[in-house]
Image: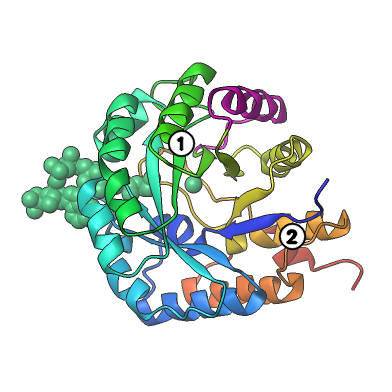
Amino acid sequence: MTRRIDIVEVGPRDGLQNDPANLTTDQKLEFIERLQACGVKRMETGAFVSPRAVPKMADSGDVFKRAARPAGTSHIALALNEKGVRRAIDSGANEINFVLVAGEGFGRRNQNMSPQQSADALAACAPLIHEAGLPLSATIAVAFGDPFSGEVDTSIVANLAAQAQRAGVNEVALGDTIGVATPWDVRDRIERVRIEAPDVYLRLHFHDTRGLALANIHAAIEASVHTIDASCGGIGGCPFAPAATGNIATEDVIYMLDRAGYETGIDLNQMIATARWLETALQHPVHSSLSRAGPFPV
Ligand code: COA
Ligand code: ZN
């Protein structure tokens, strides 16, 4: 079993898109540089969506053009239609993350698409992304439950993953957008997706809305998943999900993994310091456990 876990830092995108604060482009760039100094190699840096839908991502073009790119780092751009994909490629994204949606209700409100329409949009956009030579991943939003339509059937998630595989996606992220998953759901969905889409790498994305994100990450790792999303300070959430709360905090994940002997390449103390810096930039406290309690052993 590998002892390496890759963390995808999603603070600059999933984190900031729903925060009450309005960081300037310069502050976003400073956040990104601080994350890179912690050892972050892969991050969701911004989103190329309608600026009317998500005003906080309106400056993503500038963020991508100006973001530092130390060797071996990758800036991921989120997109969910052709216009977004073209903007992402033009802005110099290193990777595209396309958003599929597993629930009708959330799909309508978030991106005005049904689950099948989101898969069709991916199939239509994938050739553009392949032509540009960029790695393509897909996040399946509300993969564990939809705030408007309720339970999401595992077969829908597995079917979307299979369509993503056919479109040439190399990594599929199962997104618990509203924080309703349990560790047993996690194992079940991973098993089903592996049957229907055996060639894609799996990545898991948890929000800690109901306090189960670390348990869910443990379940994913026990199921041999090696890539986990997390957000510095635990900031974030989706503007289209009622009562959305933060992502699992990167420093809390690193603490758990460090203590278990996993390598992430990310420095815990520096990530805690970055979360504390973020509090001053956002002008409100962040909710991670480690930024309050500090590391152990000291
Ligand atoms: N970037 C910038 N503008 C975009 C865009 C993109 N990727 N996609 C669409 N637009 C603009 C269109 O040009 C159009 O502008 P106009 O009214 O000035 O002509 C407007 O948005 C509506 O476009 P339309 O294609 O009719 O989209 P829609 O109203 O059906 O909305 C989305 C669909 C996908 C554009 C919108 O719901 C969206 O951007 N959602 C983002 C959700 C999100 O980021 N959630 C969090 C992450 S999962
Ligand atoms: Zn999220």
On screen, residue 158 versus residue 1, left or right, reads left
On screen, residue 44 versus residue 249, left or right, reads left
Task: Answer whether residue 248 is magenta in the image.
Answer: no
Which residue is pictured at 36% across the width and 31% down the height?
Answer: 106
Q: Is residue 240 above or below residue 86?
A: above
Residue 73: x %, y % from top left: 54, 71
Q: Quadrant of residue 9?
A: bottom right
Residue 185: x %, y % from top left: 65, 25
Is residue 50 visible in the rendered image? The answer is: no
Which residue is pictured at 82% across the width and 57% down the height?
Answer: 262
How is the model colour-coded? rainbow
SS at badge 1:
strand
Marks 2 and 1, how far apart in space?
24 Å
In the image, what residue type sits under mark 1? Ile
SS at badge 2:
helix
Which residue is pictured at 83% across the width and 60% down the height?
Answer: 258
Q: Which residues are magenta?
A: 178-198
User: Considering depth in this image, is 14 or 4 the residue closer to the camera?
Assistant: 4
Q: Quadrant of the C terminus?
A: bottom right
Which numbered disc flags the more N-terminal residue, 2 or 1?
Answer: 1
- On residue 127, the disc is none
Q: Is residue 19 above or below residue 118?
A: below
In the image, what residue type sits under mark 2? Ile
CB under 8 Å between callouts 2 and 1?
no
The residue beneath circle 2 is: 254
Q: Quadrant of residue 146?
A: top left
Neighbours of disc 1 within 10 Å: few (<14), some (14-19), many (20+): many
Identify the main secondary structure in magenta.
helix
User: Considering depth in this image, is 145 or 225 the residue closer to the camera?
Assistant: 225
The residue beneath circle 1 is: 140
Q: Quadrant of the N terminus?
A: top right
